[in-house]
Amino acid sequence: MEIWKTTLLGREWFGFFAAALVAFGSIFATADGRANSHSTVELVMMEEEGCGWCERWREEIGVVYNKTPEGRTAPLRIVDVHEPMPSDLQFLKPAYFTPTFILVSKGREIGRIQGYPGEDFFWALLGQLMTKLSTGAVKAETTK
């Protein structure tokens, strides 16, 4: 029961953080209102046709993801692993398992979740990645 209380409190705190991050991120918008691709945060889902775990994620999480604080902070972007990597994501290492979720910010990979471990574990793992994003605990890596 304590874990559930901690999770709820963590999600309430995260909602506040997500709103602040979105507001701060708007500073990086260009004059015409489009976000600079290296200043935006997004969750990239690498998937492939026929992936049963991808479908399960869509049923359990995908239907609500964009309505959550996490989804508003890091909108979902779906990329097929068998298609060429989009030019603005060329810096990412390949994903060998589907689904793979990659949190991206300012042209850098913050972290990834390989596979779909179920709803509760997914939210916990995504929360860890979001905390890494908020605390700046990201390795100093150069990108292409």
Image (cartoon, rainbow, N blue to C red):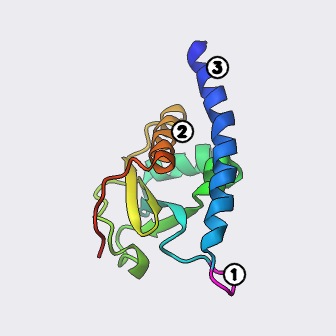
Q: Earlier in the sequence, mark 3 or mark 2?
A: 3
Task: Give the number of the mark in front: 2 or 1.
Answer: 1
Which corner quadrant holds the N terminus? top right
Amino acid type, callout 3: Lys
Residue 90: name its quadrant: bottom left
On the question of residue 63 being in view, the answer is no
Mark 3: few, some, or many residues within 10 Å (few <14, many ≥20)? Answer: few
Amino acid type, callout 1: Gly
Mark 1: few, some, or many residues within 10 Å (few <14, many ≥20)? Answer: few
Is residue 31 part of the magenta span, yes or no? yes
Task: Give the number of the mark in front: 3 or 1.
Answer: 1
CA separation in Å, label 2 and label 1: 31 Å
The residue beneath circle 2 is 123
Q: Earlier in the sequence, mark 2 or mark 1?
A: 1
Question: Element type at marker 3?
Answer: helix
Q: Any mark on residue 5, and which?
A: 3
Residue 79: name its quadrant: bottom left
